[in-house]
Amino acid sequence: MIKLLVVTAAVLTLDFTFPASVRHPDYGVVAAIQFLEGPPLQQLQNLGVGSVRIGLNWSLIEPLPDRFDLADPRIQGWLDRAHAAGLHIFATLGDPPSWAAPCPSCMPYNLSDWYGYVFHVLAQFQYLGNDITFGIWNEPNLGKFLFPPDPQLYGDLFDYADMARRDVNPGARLAGPETEPGALAGGFFDAARARMERRMQPQDVFTVHWYPGTRSPDLLTYMQDVVARSGKHEVWLTETGEKNPDDALQASRLLTIIDTFNRRLSGQWSKIFVYRFWGPDRDEDEAFGLLRQDFSVRPAFQAFHDAMYRIFRVSLLAANGRYVTEDNDGRGSLRAIAATAGARETFEIDDLNGGSLQSGDLVRIRAADGRYLQAAGRNRPLLANDDCACTDEGVFIVESTSAAPSMMALKAVAGGWYASLDAGRAADILVNRPSSGPRERFQVDVR
């Protein structure tokens, strides 16, 4: 659990000239697949989200038995354009055609038909690798989306999806159960989770929905409860938003949701998707939209854009005049030994507070191999060996001083100790100092 420490130093904007921030996959929107082109796709890019949730509906993919339309240039083109734009694709699978089930929300007549649909979708988009995730069904705890709403039936759907995954692409990522908040208190989530866990792979994700309202629990408490039930799996909030025709109210209330995500207590809750990007005229959900009918933006669009935390690529020059680099010792040890800054001396700073990077902001720092820096205890080396930065040990507070605004000190949230250049020949970076001085300050060079 990340504890928000109070920083007594003055809050200063760090005096770095950063380029445009890198698109961040932790933020997404829900959009119809046909919006992945033209003006709406351009607005997706303008928004700056790094993920999009779409439907790859069974009725679209297999309108007739054994007639798979995945090669349809429209479907392929939509996904390829989204991928080329740098978006992670979260594709929801469900919505059976009339030949496969008695209604669009009903369990399939034959689970082998469901297996075939999932198999062909995973096979077709295997080339996207980790850039696509497949969600199993939508809100199965509600009868209007899964009939009957039985967690054991949902478990059957997940079982057969996993069998298809193992047969065609064992590395594919599945996600579920896509439940709305009532599923937690009602027991549906736990029953579905128990069925899913015996089939889940390490890359799989638990997914839930949340909307503001009198029947919804507090968002932060709700997500903490879901995380506590999810073992080591990531948790994604794949639907949330504010349905409000009043522009100002929609923006302010959506900002409260995003701020809760930004200040969450665990990085294990790793994605948020806002419902929704655009709603057609006379659609009952039009008031959720971030865009107007002509694709111009509502204030909530800009509020969301501004609230996203950003990632910055930097190198860190230590007090000995050498750059911090990841050693090749297999442990992820960090040492200030590089004469110049290259790929292994480049780190990504995730500013978890959003806006500009300021003294006192919470950050995660990722090394070139994709693993996050971890402060594993006092007088221990600073290591790049954390896969998700899901605990205090992977989160730091950045600090600067007015005298040297381009210098940065890193204070570990776990324990409150500063990262420091060791005085020994190894030039290790240790987490062991109660305050910051010259050896605890690093010059930040933007990459």
Image: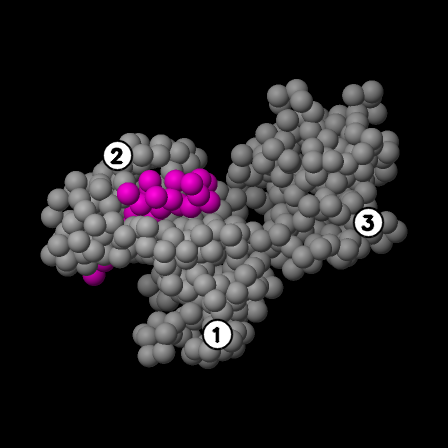
Residue 266 versus residue 92: which sits nearer the camera?
92
The structure residue drawn at horizontal position 73% and vertical position 31%, both measured from the top left corner, is 325
Q: Residues within 10 Å of mark 3 (few under 14, many from 20)?
A: some
Of callouts 3 and 1, which one flags the residue occurring earlier in the amino acid sequence?
A: 1
Closer to us: mark 3 or mark 1? 1
Q: Helix, strand, or loop for circle 2?
A: helix
**CA distance for labels 3 and 1:** 40 Å
The structure residue drawn at horizontal position 67% and vertical position 22%, both measured from the top left corner, is 328
Q: How many marks?
A: 3
Q: Tell me if residue 399 comes above or below residue 344 in the rendering.
A: below
Q: Quadrant of residue 337?
A: top right
Badge 3 is on which residue? Answer: 406
Q: Residues within 10 Å of mark 2 (few under 14, many from 20)?
A: some
Q: Residues within 10 Å of mark 1 (few under 14, many from 20)?
A: some
Of callouts 2 and 3, which one flags the residue occurring earlier in the amino acid sequence?
A: 2
Residue 335 versus residue 60: which sits nearer the camera?
60
Would residue 135 be visible to someone looking at this image?
A: yes
The structure residue drawn at horizontal position 48% and vertical position 42%, both measured from the top left corner, is 268
Q: Which residues are magenta?
A: 120-148
Q: Position of residue 122 (x, y in %)?
A: 33, 42
Q: Tell me if residue 45 comes above or below residue 197 in the rendering.
A: below
Q: Three-letter amino acid code at disc 2? A: Met
Q: Helix, strand, or loop for circle 3?
A: strand
Q: Tell me if residue 66 comes above or below residue 245 in the rendering.
A: above
Q: Quadrant of residue 10?
A: bottom right
Query: Which label was assigned to residue 346?
Result: none
**CA distance for labels 2 and 3:** 53 Å
Query: Which label was assigned to residue 295?
Result: 1
Badge 2 is on which residue? Answer: 163
Q: Position of residue 318 (x, y in %)?
A: 81, 35
